[in-house]
Amino acid sequence: MKKSIYLYLGFVLVCSTSACDPHGWQDDPDLDNKLQTNIEQGLTSSLQFEGDSLEVFTLKERMAHYKVPGLSIAIVKNGAILWAKGYGIADTKTDSFVDEQTLFQAASISKPIAALAALKLVEEGKIDLDMDINQYLTSWKVPESKFTQSEKVTLRRLLTHTAGMTVHGFPGYAQTDTFPDDVAVLNGNGNTGRIFVDTIPGAINRYSGGGYTVIERVVEDLSGQDFTAYLKNNVLEPLDMNRSTYQQPLGDDWTNVSAAYNGKGERYPGGWHNYPEQAAAGLWTTPSDLAKYIIAIQETLQGNTNPVLSRSMIQQMLTPHLGGQGLGPAVRNSGDSLTFSHRGKNAGFTNNMTAWAYRDEGIIVMTSADQGKGLIQEIERAASEVMGWDLSPSRVETTIELSEEEMVNRVGTYELKARDFQVNLQLEDGRMVIIDPSSGDKYPLRALDELRVIDIVDGDIFTFEKHPDGSIASMTQGERYRFEKID
């Protein structure tokens, strides 16, 4: 078991039960302290091996492991923020620390918040969920094609990623890049392709940030307001999300902002990327502000007045469509187990938000790193152990020992010819290791059986194929990437 001192200058407690909930918790008055202890001292890997002793880590150790400089957490219970805390460095350039008020890019969690604006326009009678979206667009039109002859792009389909629109996501623009407007992005004059329909609307669920950029135009065209201003006045301020903005690029009046960091823990030039695709990726916010969104949804379902949408509209929003997608958030399970959630990934930011619609509970974790996903899962699992949730359970694998001859047989250089990319498989201290020569990163392997090994860092499975003489011909990562053995 690994243990270390976890409290250091960059770890700042910003909210406790007494500060966040003046009423206290009748079920367990020490729940927030238990959460804090388990998250800071009780993290475990998402990948466990049968027969191994459970290795427990501190949060500080795992932040270093995943190269996550800073993160922020908020947990909801009984209609309030039970516990919230910031950890680590917000910006290595200014030596500032993360606290509860530190802004992170929400990335794709921008979408369910932006969806509230579109649904508000529906409730106001300005747009129908199921009518041709081109009836409402004035500044830009969805290009007509053979795919739109019988079925049309509608707001419902855009919100549920079933409109057949192209462009999955957006890389953003560095501070030195020319910053296009969203119409230029839609026309393919930014750093992504043209956004259009390439399959029959309503036929499949396929994630499309491009579709949410169309929604951005719908909101502006129907409201006559700038997207940033409309969201501020009609969604963010009514929900008391005062540490949130869709402003892109972010203005100097917004302070206490986290920088973005790549997979090596290096700060992105200029601090972060900018996103003209505001509805899809442009929200700056905090976990505590996203908690207010969660609480508003939960309270509305209980019959309380929502400052943005009616209970009926919230119920429609949480009705699953193709692929379990609601009108904005992803929707899973049913009854008391119904959850609404969304993940977020921008350059240098990785986040997750999950809430139970009828159990008044939820968790938001935001990180300032490209490699934050694994850490988020470990935090969710630690919180689940205290809260009685089932988020991010560990995956348990059974392994075998290969003979030295079998391991030596696998040693060599493997090439992914389609991408002109090579990796080396070597033995280190009697164990197989894949080494990426371009980065120097190492991925230790364990054998699942005679032909399959697992990367114990990322959990990827590699399957070997042999020549008739028993020598290794190739290894395939997952079911997609075939690396041929070239020496």
Image: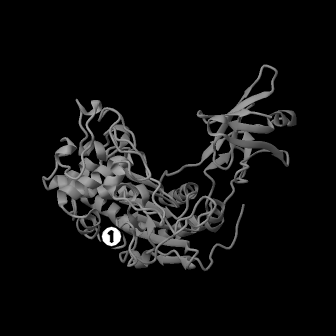
* Quadrant placement of the C terminus: top right
Q: Is residue 335 visible?
A: yes
- Drawn side of residue 130 relative to residue 161, left or right: left
Rendered residue at 85%/45% (across/down): 430
- Drawn side of residue 31 relative to residue 26, left or right: right
Mark 1 belongs to which amino acid?
Met
Q: Position of residue 213 (x, y in %)?
A: 33, 52
- Rendering quarter of residue 468: top right
- Drawn side of residue 196 relative to residue 343, left or right: left
Q: Nearer the viewer, residue 427 or 215?
A: 215
* Quadrant placement of the N terminus: bottom right
- Rendering quarter of residue 307: bottom left
Q: Position of residue 99 (x, y in %)?
A: 49, 75
Residue farthest top in this picture: 468
Rendered residue at 70%/51% (across/down): 438
Q: Is residue 69 above or below residue 183?
A: below
Q: Which residue is mark 1?
A: 241
- Rendering quarter of residue 486: top right
Residue farthest left in this picture: 125
Q: Nearer the viewer, residue 348 or 55?
A: 348
Rendered residue at 32%/42% (across/down): 320
Q: Nearer the viewer, residue 271 or 475?
A: 271
Say what secondary structure mark 1 lies in: loop
Rendered residue at 71%/53% (across/down): 441
Q: Residues within 10 Å of mark 1 (few under 14, many from 20)?
A: some
